[in-house]
Image (spheres, rainbow, N blue to C red):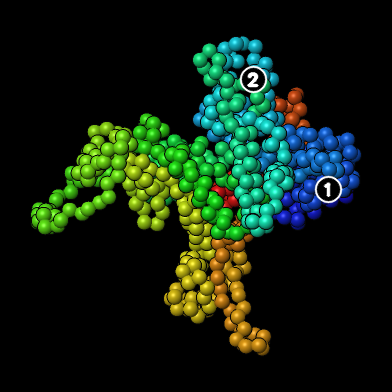
Amino acid sequence: MSVEAEILRFSKSQSTKSNLYTTVAKTHLGEVAAVVISILISYGRLTAKDISQRSKIQLKLVKLTLVSLIQLNCIYYWHDKTSNNVYYSFNERGILMLLHSGEIIVHIKNKFGEEAAELTQHLIEFGNIKIEDYLINFKDEESKYKRESIITTLFTQKWLIGVSKVDFNPIEDLWMTVYEEVLRNTPRSTTMSEAKRIAEVKEEAKQKLSKLIENSRDVKQHIVIKDGLKRMNPSTIIRFNLDRFEKHLRTRCFVDFSRFKIGVLSSMVYEAALTAIEDNSPDMRHFFLEVTGLLNDPDERREFTNSIENKLVDDKKITFTLKDVLKYLPKEVDLRNSILSHNFLKPNPISKKRVNSDSEDQAPKKIKLEPDSEGQIQSPEEHTMEFEDFQRNIDVDNSNAQSLGLINQHLKLLASNSSVKFVVETTPGVYMVPFTEIVKNLKRHYYDTLVKYTLGADSLRVLRCLKACKIADEKTLANSVLLKEKAVRNTLFNLINLNIIEIQEVPRSADRAASKTFFLFRHKESNAYSFLRNSLLFSMAELSQNIIDFKSENKILLEKCEREDVKGHEDELLLESELKLLKNLKAREILNIGKINRLKSMFEVFGVL
């Protein structure tokens, strides 16, 4: 067995990510690229010479492979000025791009057209493209202008982003460079403790790194105004933005979740609302969260994520109105008679009379008055009149298929769901989406559903009881879920085997004998989700390897079918047994790809969100 094959074999047992990423790299980029990626995952940062020594591949071939992988955003590089060495490390974003490539191209084609999908395919294939180098392939001026307008549209909607040097450097090294620079420029003081000085340095370094990253991704620096029109700078190097596609995946998951919880028409309204704010919505992962040691405490990470969402709400980047929803709602959606209006309800005159008589007896409540935007103080009656005017303007109108009143009532349904609030009304007619809270509920829903249909309803009952109790023993669980102790014991065994729940030994005394020990059980979401995520990655890698294996077993037949003189004439030039085998191979490949896509849709919930 060659050294390359040995390295690829060991990558399978190293980790689930290493197994999948190496398999994807081998399928799309070749065996040498897969070996280089496997070594970088195993050892971390290495120089080209170190990679050559560990893989037994010639240094020249290693360098050529590294250049291609950097171009495809599969590898970072960092020039260390002290040792004058160039270090390379693995970047998973490039492999994830290849993993989602088919879905990306299909979505861009459906949304922007064939030409946009063709451009996206080129960007995935080559990694980065200079705009003027891409446009030079079109000799017709009309075609050039059309392609340039497509690039501008994709760029302004953040499907494409400009490439800068920062994109090829590891965030860890960028952070350390900025942090050390700020630390050097912040002198020690006798009036300030060292802990306070380090905290101030860290905050200043955070702001400086944020500004550095934001400037590199600023859209305005790549757009020029020519003849009164927005046009792209021809010297801009562009690449596809995977973060933007992950936002689309999140939107799709949210819409499916709302369809299950509320209904089809409300989910369509929700999809239009999410589409209106999708490009400005918070990223799936912030670069601060990728820096080791910067945000260690889970509560601190949670607060940081919530602060990003709150800032976007304050800046009105992820808030939307009824007219925004109407703008993105498909024209064929008919909302008439989907909401039961108050006209169908018979008012109770007695209760109405009682309310009126009670309201006469009650004194008006004093409220604090605040000046409006012009500095004039409005009375409570004026506030009430404004709100009533707003309500009258959005009354349910069943004569219009997409009236603002119907849209508002569907948003009210989304906001008033007892288990999950899909939207929150900040002011009358203005809504926002609580992304963090929905993601948490979405994962719980899918995980509970998976447990129910995999292990049975009893397992879900035990799991939900354990979530409510936080930690409990076998007897407490049996009494809570109203099952026999034997059934609970068997259910717990299955749940423990799948790492859904954890077991904790509690000794009754200093004697550690089994007879004097009892056990408690608990469920940790982070550990359970991590195990499920690794299982999904492993299964996807196994299915991908299965496709590679049966293709290699029938390599001669597949190479024969790829010949130019055979293409299109398979029925005439191939034997009946070969045609039958070829049909079976295609059926097996389609079956495995379908399984991979189903696993990938589950991975989007637990691995991407």
Q: Secondary structure at mark 2?
A: loop
Of residues 518 and 292, the one nearer the viewer is: 292
Of residues 449 and 152, the one nearer the viewer is: 152
Please name the residue shown 61% across and 38% down the image.
Answer: 211
The kind of residue on which mark 1 rests is Ala
- Residue bearing the label numbered 2: 234
Vertical placement of residue 106 versus 80, above or below: above
Disc 2 to disc 1: CB gap under 8 Å: no
Crowding around mark 1 (Cα neighbors within 10 Å: few <14, some 14 to 19, many 20+) is few
Vertical placement of residue 491 versus 328, above or below: below
- Residue bearing the label numbered 1: 5
User: Residue 409, percent across and down?
Assistant: 30, 43
Is residue 35 visible from the viewing direction of this image?
no
Is residue 163 visible from the viewing direction of this image?
yes
Please name the residue shown 52% across and 40% down the image.
Answer: 248
Left or right: residue 81 versus residue 182 is right
